[in-house]
Image (cartoon, rainbow, N blue to C red):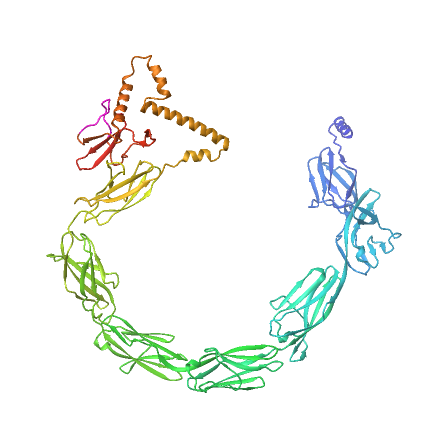
Amino acid sequence: MILQLVHLFGLLVCGSQAVLQVSISLNKVELSVGDSKFIKCTVIGEPVKVEWFNPQGERIVSSPRVALHTGEDSSRLTIYRAVVEDAGIYRCQATNAEGQTQEATMVLEMYQKLAFRDVKSPQEFRHGETAEVVCDVISSPAPAVSWFYQKGSKSMEITEEHYSRFQVLPNNNLQIHKVTKVDEGVYRCEARVEARGEINFVDIEVVVNVPPVLSVVQQSFNATADYQESVTFTCITSGSPDPEVTWHRNNIYLHGLSVPRKGQQLERSEQYVLNNLEGGRSTLTIRNILQGDGGDYTCRATNKAGSEERELFLKVFVQPHITQLRNVTAVEGSAAMISCVAEGEPVPEISWRRASDGRSFADGDKSQDGRVDVRGRHGRSMLTISGVKLPDLGRFDCEALSRIGGHQKSMFLDIEYMPKFQNNQTIFYSWEGNPVNISCDVKSNPPATMLWRRERLTISAEGTANTRVHTTDGKSLLEVTPVSDRDFGRYNCTARNNIGAKYQEFILAQADVPSNPYSVRLSAVSQRSATVTFMKPDSHGGVPIGHYLVNYKEVGSQDWRDVKSHGVQTTVLLTGLEPNTTYEVRVAAVNGKGQGEFSHTESFQSLPIREPSPPAVHGQRGVGKAYRLGLVKQDDGGMPIVEYIVKYKTDKEDQWMTKLVSGQHDFALLQPLQWNTRYEVEITARNVKGLSEPTFYQFFMPQKPDIIADSLFSGLGLGPVVGLGLAGLLLVLVVVDVSCYFLRQCGLLMCITRKICSKKTTTSGKSKEMEEGKAAYLGDGSKDPIVEMRTEEERITNHDGSPVHEPNETTPLTEPEKLPLKEENGKETLKPDMIEIKVHSDNSIHTKQDDSKA
């Protein structure tokens, strides 16, 4: 910085004479291979250009690895990922307008850091060979390398004095003579550069692979084929790493001869089960052994260090085996010969079984009818059937037996026969313009071809203008659409196969409309409906009846109304009738051809309108002090039910309470009711004609549930319960004393009152009236409430003259339950409230309970 100031001062003194001064920020740079560095060159003066030159004297041109960044009075040289060849002297040269140049130099020295190149871990070696553990390390100057053996947390340096089998080679690798499993472990390669004090290391895992050692538990096995037997071969192996065991198939033995075969590796399958168990045990299980499974097998163990194998042998005994049995086809009436050939050791005996009836035949046997005969010798048997019949068709089982076991196979005896017709219907009905399908069903073997003929003329498969042929397996449909009388008559179906031919004749007859039904009867006649029953016609015209048509009308009217039956039902319901009206009814049958004649006309009269039948009632307990009555409508008498009149009372009262329910409802809710009380109910239905007979019903309201007691005492202990009991007893005593005060004018409260009242001369008028009312009620001794009868026109007012709101259909019949009074005997009795009964102009009754005291 001081030098730059001196140069600047010199320039100021000299005036216009410009002198260039060039300086580099670093005169000497040490750079490691692969590192990056930049060097700045500064110029004092007025340069026109600043350039850099490499150690070879060449001008440096900016590139991706060596970059230049030049300004007016400076330039920066950047070297990326330096290499050894970058070492040398670099020059920074500045040039002014007069062509004068000045330069500065910088020395770049390169060195190599410690670096390990592609050192692999782990490194594997074979047991017993000379192992060379590779540790490729570079640096400049060359490093000093030491080797250490890592044992747990300790690290021991390897020297030739202590480790005679170990040697550090000139290339810094570690050589181990006759390496063993004991030499396995982690080795550390440590490199040092003394000049720089640089040190680094790499840990290398050494793995020693030991060749497999293999042994077998049992070398030879015997088995019998076709008995679903299994044989398990076992090999025991050791080695490092754990050997991979494979199984191979060598020679095979057929009929006692060894057939060479290349050692094919066996793969896991349903027959071959391969397992690797603990302790180096490997097994091969051969399942469902067959004759061809006999021969040599090889167990081979392989790992990185080598392989070893052992041979095992399987000898298979042959059970009887059927080698020849074929299906046979015979013509009905001819002879069928079935042959069965079997082999095995020893030679098996052959028998037959017919599957259709389970009958068995051995050598020399014959059937009872003499048609079945069996002959055989030396593993061959021939079953002969003479005069084959259709029942002989089916499966035959051939069974070969010996002391080793048995074998069974089946064959099928197929019987060819000429066509046989399966039709039950040979007469078909139709009419002009109506298509009909004539079905020709044929059973034959082999399948037959079918042709249709009409008056010796063959009908082609494409058909004609009014005929079509549809053919499937064993069936041919001739679709005929008659257009005139000539299309009715006889049609011939001919079936033919290579056994023979047969034909069957069909008749196409003209269909007619059905005859008329008869025995028309009317039943269940009411005001609005009636049921018509009748007998089916004697003739359906050749075509099934589709439905029946019922005509009915009022007598004197010309307009018939139609009702169709459901399918072919002979009962039809007439609805929408007018009450007390005479009707005429007739019935006709309808089939595909058309409508038949009507039956004889019958007359009937609907019932006149009357009062409805009594409703049916069923009840169930409601919520709280309510009871629900279900109302089931019966005969409404020809007019809708307007309303139900429900009257109810307790069995101890004479006064009925009334509730009106709309005829559209199916229930009545009675509330509020008294606990532990039996009620009588009378229900009447009303239409515009009048009232039905009443239906009577009774029900019982149970005891009032003690919900409070259950909830209070369920979680309390003995002490709290006793305390509550004493408090309840005290409360009962107070209630009894109060009752005695009002009912008998005695008790503790009465004494206190008399003492207080003796000091007073007057009492309130309201209290006096209340006492007089109680006295009047109690003196009478009656338990019935006071009833006041009023008409609808009378106006009801309160004591203060305000109007009383009248009840309607939604107003409860009674007020909510009030606390009952107690008589001396403890029985409950109703409070002496007033019940108001209103009689409306339509004779309906409403009741209301007055809250005022008597």
Please state which of residues 222 and 8 is positioned toward the viewer in this rendering: 222
In the rendered view, does 644 fall on the left or right side of 346?
left
Query: On the rendered image, what quadrant is the C terminus found in?
Result: top left
Whole-percent x, y for residue 721 in the image: 47, 31
Whole-percent x, y for residue 806 in the image: 23, 31
Write down the quadrant of residue 703 in the picture. top left
> What main secondary structure does the magenta stretch of the protein show?
loop
Residue 563 vertical position relative to residue 198 in the rendered view, above or below: below
Observer able to see residue 563: yes
Residue 798 vertical position relative to residue 142 in the rendered view, above or below: above
Write down the quadrant of residue 248 in the picture. bottom right
Please state which of residues 482 and 62 is positioned toward the viewer in this rendering: 482
Magenta segment = 794-805
Write down the quadrant of residue 844 in the picture. top left
Within the magenta stretch, is there residue 800? Answer: yes
In the rendered view, does 119 fall on the left or right side of 782?
right
Observer able to see residue 142: no
Q: How many marks?
A: 0
Whole-percent x, y for residue 786 in the image: 23, 29
Please state which of residues 136 and 156 is positioned toward the viewer in this rendering: 156
Residue 530 vertical position relative to residue 218 in the rendered view, above or below: above
Q: Residue at x 26, y 72 (%)?
A: 481
Please state which of residues 101 and 388 is positioned toward the viewer in this rendering: 388
Whole-percent x, y for residue 119 in the image: 76, 52
Q: Residue at x 28, y 43 (%)?
A: 698
In the rendered view, does 430 fall on the left or right side of 309?
left
Within the magenta stretch, is there residue 281? Answer: no
